[in-house]
Amino acid sequence: MTTPVYLDHAATTPVRDEVLAAMTPYFGAQFGNPSSVHRWGREARVALDEARERLAGCLGAHPDEVCFTSGGTEADNLAVLGVFRARRSEGRPAVVTTPIEHKAVLAAAHQAAHEGGEERLAAVLPDGTVSREAFARVIDARVAVASVMWVNNETGVMQDIPALGAMAREAGAVFHTDAVQAFGKVAIDLAALPIDLLSLSGHKLGAPKGVGALYIRRQTPLAPLFHGGSQDRGRRPGTENVAFAVGLATAAELTRAEHAQEAARLAALRDRLEGALRAQVPDAVIHGAAAPRAPHIVNVSIPGTSSEALLMALDLRGIAASAGSACQSGSVSASHVLAAMGVPTPLALGALRLSLGALSTEAGVDRAAEVLATLARKARGLPASGMAAGDAPAACAFVPAGGG
């Protein structure tokens, strides 16, 4: 039986054995509520405080600047809406972001506008990087918070966060970055960066789904999303999830320790994958290839194919990937990220995201490239031996065939 190939690490990653082992005691004998004063509660409080301190150490932050959340979406919402609601009375009702953000940030900006605020988008260049000129035009004294994703979750394109953060701060805006795809792929030292808020998600780095964190620099104005008890200094009321906090801290330490070696390994695999795709499908388009990119994401379009059909065919052959388009109510719409980059809709509708991680190997990426090239040739009615760069596609989609 052919070994399955998992190329969807940007969607989620397997929980690491070390993380599960670290969490297990808090599902058993050490089950206490960290707000309780008895022995069980004190044990839980120590574990929670240590987890906060360990995660802060991975970020170059102070422990009191770490707020555990249910994941990246909550962290993004708390950052954007929390600052907006805290600062709108100061005459700063505007939220600045970009059209290539995760929907959690874009939806939070929409909500701010719904509450009487102002949503501003800084345009991006065709390579997927934020235009400095466009960013400068939307940053002024009315902006409460600016939010820019560090590594794009669809293309892997990296933004110049130090430069954009400095621009936001110069205008008096709080600066937030969604670092869900950046942690473990780029070096992060918040003590040396102009970042006020930073979002993380545990299941992107070997921790379980359902846990994340928001770094909140001291003195950053922030209104809570939830209301209730006094946990986490009132920033996030509710009984803390001790086991998951411990798991996130463990995953973060392991990821940080392996960062340099793993980033180099993934970059080599990415280059191998892209090289194989370009060799076998010369007109394949790698989106964002001209920009600085994180090492783990390849976003590729093959003209004349449908991502939906390719994904089904890949899955039948044991290869997991994802699309740069979403299927909603029976219709396929182009990725908002690729649309903002100016990618033509027919090309965007054929985009695939192949994302690398712990389960990725040379054999796996070689097989994925070979299978994808074969499927693309079938879709376009081309001979199995290959194609020339000038050959035109014969069809826009296909019904995937069974077998290998």
Image (cartoon, rainbow, N blue to C red):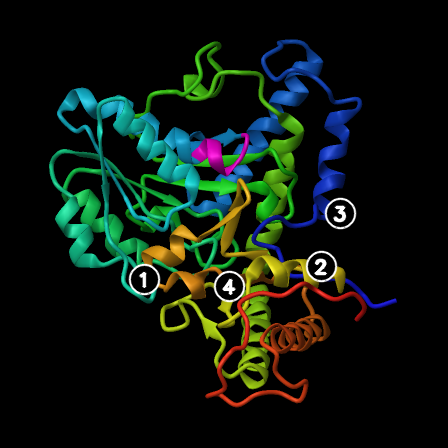
The residue tagged with tag 2: helix, strand or loop?
A: helix
| Residue at which label 3 appears | 17
In contact (CB < 8 Å): disc 2 and disc 4: no
Question: Disc 3 marks which amino acid?
Answer: Asp
In contact (CB < 8 Å): disc 4 and disc 3: no
User: Closer to us: mark 4 or mark 3?
Assistant: 4
User: Along the line of sight, which residue is nearer the eye, 139 or 27?
Assistant: 139
Residue positioned 73% across, 46% down in the render: 18
In this picture, is 244 found above or below 202? Answer: above
| Residue at which label 4 appears | 350
In which quadrant of the rendered image does the C terminus lie? bottom right
User: Along the line of sight, which residue is nearer the eye, 122 or 332?
Assistant: 332
How far across and down, in percent of the image, does residue 251 sit? Answer: 62, 46
The residue tagged with tag 3: helix, strand or loop?
A: helix
Question: Disc 2 marks which amino acid?
Answer: Asp
Bin the neighbour count of mark 3 within 10 Å (Cα to Cα): few under 14, some 14-19, many 20 and up.
few
| Residue at which label 2 appears | 315
Bin the neighbour count of mark 1 within 10 Å (Cα to Cα): few under 14, some 14-19, many 20 and up.
some
How far across and down, in percent of the image, does residue 43 sit? Answer: 67, 21
How far across and down, in percent of the image, does residue 307 sit? Answer: 56, 61
* Nearer-N-terminus badge (4/3): 3
Quadrant in the picture for residue 156: bottom left
Quadrant in the picture for residue 340: bottom left
- Magenta stretch? 70-75
* Nearer-N-terminus badge (1/4): 1
Residue positioned 71% across, 59% down in the render: 315
| Residue at which label 1 appears | 342
In this picture, is 322 found above or below 41? Answer: below
